[in-house]
């Protein structure tokens, strides 16, 4: 998924040494563009809109349901160190899941990024990372508090390297946190699902708004 997310992009993180080192460690394979999961013709409740700086984007309504089998798009095992670059604009204060990779029963999110609901004028960028066999359901591996993003384009990159998660905004490291995970990369079940703008049947809130980039 989140391989060469930073290579060749025109927005934050293209010049960040930390992010680029994650990519160099993975060789020459290209980035994964998760918006390719949307497909053409567009599914119900998804439409084309003008995005940040005039580039095209996708608008997700409350009934959008974009998903496929993970094995059709994501390498297994997944990359141990990776980066995810996002350009998105929520249109509600509920935030929602930008993308998620779930187990076969759509009960647990193994990997995903979401925006939290607005509270006291702020929101959080949330990374879900749940090792296979973990008890207790979906694990929130890291979260970063930001200002409210409703109605404006949020542009950020998350890098996961070793035991650290870092958030970059506007070409600068915004914050970093430590997290604990298995020394083995994520693996996914044969019937695992990958979703954009939602997390399948997990019950996590859907994203309503526009997504311009989800690069991994």
Image (tube, grey):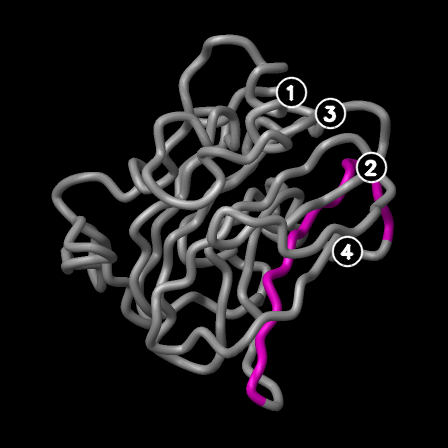
Residue closer to the observer: 13 or 153:
13
Q: What element carries label 1?
A: loop
The answer to if 103 sits in the magenta stretch is: no
Count of numbered tags: 4
Q: Which residue is drawn at 14% across and 56% down?
A: 48
Q: What element carries label 3?
A: loop
- Classed neighbour count for the residue bearing mark 1: other residues with Cα under 10 Å, few (<14), some (14–19), many (≥20): few
Q: Do the residues labelled 1 and 3 touch (CB within 8 Å)?
A: yes
Spot occupied by residue 209 in the image (x, y as percentages of width and height): 32, 68
Residue closer to the observer: 41 or 121:
121
Can you tell which of label 4 and label 2 is closer to the viewer? 2
Name the residue carrying label 2.
163
Q: Which residue is drawn at 64% across and 32% down?
A: 18
Measure the alpha-carbon separation of dots 4 and 2.
Answer: 21 Å
Res 204 quadrant in image: bottom right
- The magenta region covers 121-135
Name the residue carrying label 1.
77
Name the residue carrying label 4.
137
Mark 2 and mark 1 lie on one chain; the one further toward the N terminus is 1
Measure the alpha-carbon separation of dots 3 and 4.
Answer: 18 Å
**Which residue is the extreme one toward the bottom?**
120
- Classed neighbour count for the residue bearing mark 3: other residues with Cα under 10 Å, few (<14), some (14–19), many (≥20): some
Task: Establish if 147 lies above or below 111.
Answer: below
Q: Residue 185 carries which label?
A: 3
Mark 4 and mark 1 lie on one chain; the one further toward the N terminus is 1
Mark 1 and mark 3 lie on one chain; the one further toward the N terminus is 1
Q: Which mark is residue 116?
A: none
Q: Residue at x 17, y 50 (%)?
A: 56
């Amino acid at each position: 998924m989140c391989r060469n997310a930073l290579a060749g992009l025109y927005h934050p993180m293209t010049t960040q040494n930390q992010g680029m080192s994650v990519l160099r460690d993975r060789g020459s394979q290209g980035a994964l563009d998760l918006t390719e999961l949307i497909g053409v013709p567009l599914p119900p409740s998804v439409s084309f809109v003008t995005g940040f700086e005039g580039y095209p984007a996708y608008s997700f309504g409350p009934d959008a349901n974009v998903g496929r089998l993970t094995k059709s798009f994501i390498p297994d095992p997944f990359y141990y160190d990776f980066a995810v670059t996002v350009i998105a604009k929520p249109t509600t204060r509920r935030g929602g899941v930008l993308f998620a990779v779930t187990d076969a029963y759509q009960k647990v999110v193994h990997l995903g990024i979401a925006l939290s609901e607005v509270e006291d004028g702020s929101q959080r960028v949330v990374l879900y990372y749940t090792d296979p066999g973990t008890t207790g359901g979906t694990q929130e591996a890291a979260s970063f508090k930001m200002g409210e993003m409703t109605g404006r384009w949020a542009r950020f990159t998350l890098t996961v390297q070793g035991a650290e998660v870092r958030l970059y905004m506007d070409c600068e490291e915004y914050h970093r946190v430590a997290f604990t995970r298995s020394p083995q990369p994520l693996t996914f079940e044969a019937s695992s699902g990958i979703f954009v703008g939602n997390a399948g049947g997990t019950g996590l809130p859907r994203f309503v708004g526009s997504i311009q980039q989800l690069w991994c």
